[in-house]
């Protein structure tokens, strides 16, 4: 009996084995399975993947390879132009079937469409599936058949749709090809930094599917109980920290929603409300993907076109001070240092530091997005674009331009005892909480006692809040009306 032709399973941002519809589809074809990861030319281009993301990707690929090997399979690594590499792999293995999960980043949509057309023209079966969203961006529409630009109606429309069931349980082993195609080594991708700066990040994270599941289980057995109350508090472990795992597809949002449904069954109303609040945040992620798919230009340009003419400042010194966590505003500096050290920042603090960059310093949101892109382990084009355009006031359902976060009040409100700020700005640790978020207002004696010398041990504020606010309001008000 002749063996069925192999199926190539092209892994991308879906670095897991469970709830993996593409893998399930490949298993159903009945032939051998060749799992492949291609370090593509698009990703190799300078700046297309940040340093922190590269570090994560290396660890995650390593974990996926191990899981596949435990099932008697392999992960074939290739580097270069995906179309060419897939063509070579098809020739080497005799594969005539190719399957992947869809990506929604503009470059990936263009590339994948081209590969699909090319594969079909060769007589292959090319199958793409949804592996990373609860709903496809084109399934959710306004009554007029248009994409949504406001979150709440988007979310309500999503709730009218059902979520696809989970993929079937995995077999213990996969069918393997008679002869495996060649693979380059993972280290040849050079994803890990040449000079090892990753100690802080390493200590905080366990990339890979097992790490994602462990974190999720810990969250639903713990912090979810107080998610609504604590999710805005950077001093508490009040959120799931699943964002990098979700970005790399080590856990799927379907798995999360499914597990919460099971977990919520028979639970108290309080518990269900907490789960609903958490799922609502997952829908912000869905909204971000909806937007990037329908408005791909927003990666670089404001969704609200009239913002294009905003007169941004150009001040490399200010940008550098912000990046290094030396703005003189303690909550801003705490966030920027947390980011540098751990590759992650709490959502509330992301909003504060982003608002400070675009409103107080009036530096372009694209500069901030770029820094986040390079330093976040969860750097995600859709979420980052939404977050920055929202803060700058130029995106979908954005904060109005006149809402300018006061970094002192934000610190006092969301880090009430100062634990978070003291952790990341230790040179202010001895200041009483009353002055912690505005050290410039502390009497000389208090500063002396806390060992703080403004301008020496800790910077003076880069700008005065009231003045920066007034200037920002005037600059935004001068924009032509949209
Ligand atoms: P939880 O509160 O546990 O939420 C669960 C999941 O829901 C998150 O993992 C995330 O996937 C999703 N989510 C939650 N809040 C948001 C949100 N506001 N927008 C979109 N999705 C959300 N998130 C990224 O994943 N990558 C980014 O590059 C990114 N850049 C951002 C830039 C700015 C300026 C801002 C304001 C926000 C950005 N976010 C980004 C969104 C948000 O800050 C993070 O998703 C969140 O902090 C992750 O922490 P968590 O997993 O503990 O969140």
Image (spheres, helix red, strand yellow):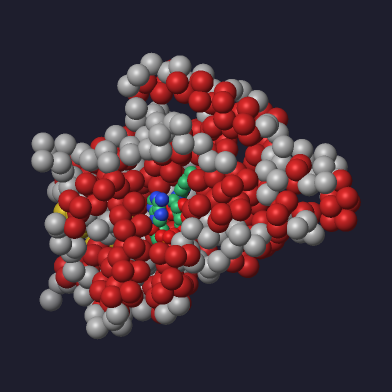
Say if 342 sits above or below 353 in the image. below
Residue located at (10% from left, 36% from top)? 144
User: Relative to 430, is 338 on the left or the right?
Assistant: left
| Res. 397 visible in picture | yes
Residue at position x 88%, y 56% in the image: 449
179 or 360: nearer the eye? 360
Whole-percent x and y of residue 421?
67, 56
Out of 295 and 67, give the one closest to the viewer. Answer: 295
- Identify which residue is drawn at 50% across, 52% down: 348
Q: Is residue 153 above or below residue 365?
A: below
- Quadrant hosting residue 114: top left
Residue 101 appears anywhere in the view: no
Quadrant housing residue 419: bottom right
Q: Quadrant of the C terminus?
A: top left
Looking at the picture, how far across and down is residue 62, in whole percent?
49, 66
Between residue 385 and residue 41, name the one nearer to us.
385
Callout count: 0
Left-right relation of 260 to 339: left
Left or right of 159, for residue 64: right
* Vertical order, 56 against 388 (above or below): below
The quadrant of the rendering that contains the N terminus is bottom left
x and y, in percent, of residue 437 in the image: 68, 49
Asked which quadrant contains residue 315, the reply is top right
Residue name at image x 85 percent, y 42 percent: 456
Q: Position of residue 340 (x, y in %)?
A: 64, 51
Near-viewer residue (230 or 444):
444
- Vertical side of 327 occupied by 266: above or below: below
Q: Taking 42 as reference, is 319 left or right? A: right
């Amino acid at each position: 009996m002749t063996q069925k032709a192999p199926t190539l399973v092209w892994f991308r941002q879906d670095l897991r084995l469970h709830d993996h519809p593409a893998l399930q589809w490949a298993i159903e074809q009945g032939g051998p399975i060749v799992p492949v990861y291609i370090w593509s030319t698009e990703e190799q281009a300078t700046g297309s993947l940040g340093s922190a993301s590269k570090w994560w990707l290396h660890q995650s690929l390593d974990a996926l390879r191990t899981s596949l090997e435990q099932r008697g399979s392999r992960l074939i690594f290739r580097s270069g132009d995906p179309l060419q590499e897939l063509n070579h792999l098809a020739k080497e293995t005799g594969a005539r079937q190719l399957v992947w999960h869809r990506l929604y980043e503009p470059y990936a949509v263009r590339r994948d469409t081209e590969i699909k057309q090319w594969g079909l023209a060769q007589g292959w079966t090319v199958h793409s599936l949804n592996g990373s969203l609860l709903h496809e961006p084109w399934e959710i529409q306004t009554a007029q058949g248009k994409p949504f630009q406001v979150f709440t109606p988007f979310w309500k429309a999503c709730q009218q749709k059902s979520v696809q069931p989970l993929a079937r349980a995995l077999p213990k082993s996969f069918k393997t090809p008679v002869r495996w195609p060649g693979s380059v080594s993972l280290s040849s991708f050079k994803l890990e930094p040449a000079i090892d700066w990753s100690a802080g990040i390493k200590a905080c994270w366990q990339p890979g599917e097992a790490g994602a599941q462990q974190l999720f289980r810990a969250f639903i057995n713990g912090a979810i109980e107080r998610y609504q109350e604590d999710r805005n508090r950077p001093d508490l472990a009040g959120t799931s920290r699943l964002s990098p795992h979700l970005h790399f597809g080590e856990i799927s949002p379907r798995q999360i929603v499914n597990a919460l449904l099971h977990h919520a069954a028979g639970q108290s109303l309080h518990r269900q409300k907490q789960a609903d609040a958490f799922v609502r945040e997952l829908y912000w992620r869905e909204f971000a993907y909806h937007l990037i798919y329908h408005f791909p230009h927003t990666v670089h340009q404001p969704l609200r076109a009239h913002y294009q003419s905003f007169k941004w400042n150009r001040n490399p010194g200010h940008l550098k001070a912000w990046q290094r966590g030396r703005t003189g505003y303690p909550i801003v500096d705490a966030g920027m240092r947390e980011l540098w050290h751990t590759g992650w920042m709490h959502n509330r603090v992301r909003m504060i530091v982003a608002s400070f960059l675009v409103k107080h310093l009036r530096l372009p949101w694209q500069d901030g997005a770029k820094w986040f892109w390079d330093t976040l382990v969860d750097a995600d084009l859709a979420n980052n674009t939404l977050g920055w355009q929202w803060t700058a006031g130029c995106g979908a359902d954005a904060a109005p331009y006149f809402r300018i976060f006061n970094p002192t009040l934000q610190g006092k409100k969301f880090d009430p005892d100062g634990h978070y700020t003291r952790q990341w700005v230790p040179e202010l640790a001895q200041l009483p909480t009353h002055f912690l978020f505005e050290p410039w207002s502390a009497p000389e004696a208090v500063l002396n006692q806390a060992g703080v010398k403004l301008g020496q041990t800790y910077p003076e504020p880069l700008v005065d809040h009231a003045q920066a606010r007034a200037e920002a309001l005037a600059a935004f008000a001068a924009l032509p009306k949209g």
